[in-house]
Structures are given as structure tokens and as C-alpha cells.
Image (tube, helix red, strand yellow):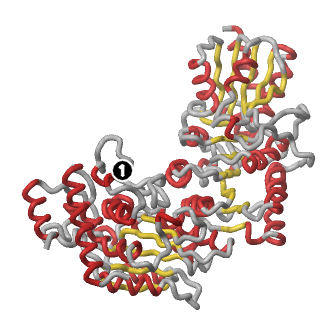
Amino acid sequence: MNKQSFSTNKILAPKQQYQDMRDAFFEELFQIASLDKDVIVLMADQGAMTFKKFEERIPDQLINVGIAEQNMISVAAGLALCGKKVFAHAIANFTTLRCYEQIKVDLSIMNLPVTIVGIGAGFTYGSDGPTHHANQDIAPMRAIPGIRILNASDTVNLSAFPHIAYQTPHLTYIRIDKDSYTVPYDKNHNFLDGIYEVIKGEETVIISTGVMIRQAVNIANQFKTKVGIINIYQPKPLNEKKLYNLLQPYKNIVVIEEHLSYGGLATIIADFLVDYSVNKKFLRIGLPDENSFIYGDREYMHKKIGISPSQITSKINIFFKN
Amino acid sequence: MLKLSELKDIARKIRLECLEMQHVAHKGHLGGAFSVTEILVALYNCGIVNISPKNSNDPNRDRIIFSKGHDCLSLYVVLAEKGFFPRAELERYGQNGTFLGGHPDHFIPGIEVSSGSLGHGLGIGAGMAVAAKLNNKKYLSYVILGDGECNEGSVWEAATFAVAQNLDNLIAIIDNNQVAATSKTQKFMGDIPMESKWRSFGWDTLSIDGNNIWEVIKAIKKTRVNSARKKPLAIIANTIKGKGVSFMEGNPKWHHGVANDDQYEQAKEELSK
């Protein structure tokens, strides 16, 4: 995929500001769908507040396929083959891993611009146990040929995602978190870039994605101007040119993610560094190679696993010393 | 429409050509290609279903989804005969660089969707049927499945969805040859008749001799009559795997077995009569 294939070259943040992550996505999607009857939302019995508006005003454009994610993806393919612009929504694990082969065959092999929407990135559903932890999905989804992955870190980039999916049709996986988090962006930021420099630093840069951007901001502030932050909200395809330029001033790279520390963002960045022969010190901080049987909220889980802000700060300090 | 004797002869020649293609390529699934032959002839050669090389991009065309992709040999022959692509391409089947793979892909003229992984076609057909209703189109979506394929759970997800959505424009045709790759399907699917499974899921059903071209034609004609019941229709086409060649009939070996020279000659002789 390259920008030349896009039907538009620039997507700015929507004017409306949101407090809730899901509202940010579905309210914008509702506005798009209200103007285009070919936009169809499929859901595998996973609701959202905005769906009430769909039911009341554009009921034909919201279909509950029931608890059947494999069929949801196949139905999405059939609709897309007949010109519909489909968004297929379920809990992140179930709309990726449960129906992985349907995504491979019906969407990727068929080259269909369906948007898969997964709610519950990482430990969004922390206390619900490992069946509900979406902490390995980026690895297999990255292996789907031609797919675009968008990982929301805040209500602002998430509110731009339905516009990206709609205006630049492509097979896309959008990861949504449940909490609310709003950050300022440069008003001219083009969300097709896939990358945003949150804070410019001097020696070290934290590269992160999704919810961990919030942790990264807290951590970077402790190091004052020394540490910068880059938000990779589009892990695939990686905007390599922009990343290459942004990395120029830095000596050290720390990748922080709420995903298994292999196969996700750290691996994507490591691949990039090797491919471009970029030689910098590299530290990955993510989840260990195990299922998590820790039940609690995100803060609690991060602390138990060793990826709370203070624990990450310690790891970075040790990294500096060595 | 052609005479019954002519249609029977078309079916015989398709099988003969499949045998030839497999013999040259030394690969291909003959058993299921032979069991599904009359179904394909009825769909493509009888003027009942609105699909041809001239309208293959027309949004109003009927859709035929060949979900049991491994049995594509006979489909390739039918599509070439119909003019979707040159007959010469059949000779390149199985050769390096051919576009006719062991399982059909969507870029082949006449192929609506890639298949080969079982259990995908019915859901895709259901999506097409929903789109037809949303777009006020009258086309029908026909999905050809194997009975072994009906072991896949995704088939029943789609079957449930089709009933919930009142998809009376969706037709599943089950090539019920009762033989899979290693054994009879009954061995791992149990004794419950195929028709009662579909009926219990809320589908209208029709059980026919799927190797009797006249019965298949009658069944396909019935799909053109509007159902007052708002239900999808499953045609259980009871067939014989390896139909037309005595030593292949009903034998799992010929799921993807390749005939040696002697077997090839004998099969050729039987199919030439």
C-alpha cells in the first residue's frame, strides 16, 4: 500500500471532541454512515452507545450477526463484493484470532477493503482474564498480507480512524481501547502519516503505541528534555521515511507496548532498524511470553507485571547506566 | 434449452475432460469433480441462472459460489466451455505458470470468490444475499458445498444467520456424495441425514438425485419461484463420488487419487460410452 493509491492525501482531526474512546469512533462512523447508505456496520453481539442512533435512524445499516465472528467476516466479504463499505465489530480477540482464516481468505486473498474493528486492546478487559486480553493480536494481524493496522491511543486519533478507513479504502484492522484519554495534536497533523511525534527529546526516544502512550508521557516528563516520544498509531504499514527522519537525533530507543514483547511494535521497530542499518541502543519493554492470570484493573496489572511507569522508569535508568 | 440427451452428453464430456486434465497434470480431485458435474451443467448450461461471460460484472447477475474449491476441475471445464476463458487454458492446468490452480481464485473469469479452505462460501453468499435486499436487486446467490464441508462450524453460523435474516434469495446446494478424503463422511459426522440438519436450522429443503440432470434442473427452476416463506433453500443433491467410473464410485481413494495409465485407459473407456 502506498499513498498514491489513496483517494485522499490528508485527513485532519475531526472538529468534534470526545471524552469516551468508543464514542470517538462510533459517533464519527455514524456521521459517515448517515451520508452514505452503503456503509454497513456488522457487530457480533458487541454493543456500543452509538448503536442506538444506528437502530433509530439508519437501522438497515447495522446488522447484529450474533456470536459468530467467522460468519461475520465472510458476510462482510459478500457485502463488500457487492459494493458495501463494511465495518465489522467485535471484541478484539474474537474479531482477529477467532476468525483469522476468514480474514486471510475472504478479505486478504480477495483483496477487499473491509474494516475490522476490535474493542478491548491489550488489558482493556484486564480483570476478565486471559481469554479477553488482546495482547498478541498485532503479531498475527501483521502477518496478513496487505493489511493496515491502526491502533488508537486517544480519542483524537481514534476519531480520525473511521475517516481514514472510509476515505482511503483498504483492508484495515482498528484496535480500540475503552478508557477515555484526550491529547492535543498539532492542528495540521495529517492522520494518514501513521506517526506522531508527541514530545521532541535529545538522547533517548520512547516509541510506543496505543494505551502505553499515556504511560510514556508520564515517564518522559521525569527525564525532562532528555526523552522524546513517538506515537506509532499505524504499526502497519510503517511510515518508514518519517520514522527514519524522526530518529536521526537520538542515540537510544525504548519501545513500550502492552503486547507480547515479540511480534508487536518492538519487533516491527527492530525489523525497521535492521532493514535500514540504523545502529542505536535498543530496549524493548512489553509483556512476557506467558498468559496473564492476574485479575485487576490496568494499573494493578501493570504493576504486577512490571510495566508501571515507575518500573519502566527504573528499567530505562538501568539501560542508561549500562 | 438443450435436450436431455444433449445435457447428459455434456456432463459425460466434462468428466472425460477432467480425467484428461488430471492425467496430464498428475494432480486434481476427480471424485468430487465427478459428483458435482450435473449440478454445474444445470447451473451454467440450462439458461435458468443469469450468469455468462457477457454479464460477469453486471450487479444484477446471479452469483454462483463454488465453496468446495478442491473439486474445481469440472468447474474449470464448464467455465471454459461457456467462454469465460479460452479452452486452451485447460491444457495448462497444473503446469507451471497456469492461472488455473488446484483451488480456484477470484481473478479467474467466472470465479466469484477464492475457495479451497472449506466453510467460507455460505457466509459470503449470505453477505451477497443481504446486499441484494439492501440494494433492491433480484439476483439469487447459489452456494455449492460438499457434505464433508458441512462438518465446518462456520457453515452452521452462516446457516443460522441466513434464517435470521430471512434470506429467501440464498440457495445452498449440497453435493451430498457422502465420501470425504479418508472415509465415508458418516464415520465422523454421524448418521443424522443431511436434509434434517438443514431443516432443523430452519431452511426449506429439497432432496434430489444430484446426478440426474433432469432432477437438478427441476430443483434449480424452483429457486426462481418466489418463496412465500421467506426462508433460504437447501438443495440436498444426493450424488455419487467418482460418478461415471466404476472403480472410482464411492471410494475415498478417488478424492484426490491420480489414475495410473491402466486406470486412466479404463476410465476413459467407460466415460467414452
Q: Residue furthest bottom?
A: B228
Q: Position of residue B247 (x, y in %)?
A: 12, 68
The chain ID associated with circle 1 is: B
Question: Considering only vertical position in the picture, is A312 above or below B27?
Answer: above
Question: Considering only vertical position in the picture, is B225 above or below A296?
Answer: below
Q: Is residue A89 visible?
A: no
Please, what is the three-letter code of the amino acid marked with disc 1?
A: Gly
Q: Classify residue A227 by image quadrant.
A: top right
Quarter in which the N terminus of chain B is drawn: bottom left
**Foreground of the two, A31 or B190:** A31
Q: Position of residue A209 (x, y in %)?
A: 72, 34
Q: How many marks?
A: 1
Question: Considering only vertical position in the picture, is B102 above or below A35?
Answer: above
Q: Classify residue A53 by image quadrant.
A: bottom right
Q: Residue at x 40, y 72 (%)?
A: B44
Q: Residue at x 57, y 19 (%)?
A: A275
Q: Which residue is mark 1?
A: B101
Q: Residue at x 29, y 44 (%)?
A: B95
Question: Considering only vertical position in the picture, is B137 above or below A27?
Answer: below
- Left or right: A49 as drawn, with respect to B106: right
Q: Position of residue A65 (x, y in %)?
A: 63, 67
Q: Position of residue B225 (x, y in %)?
A: 52, 88
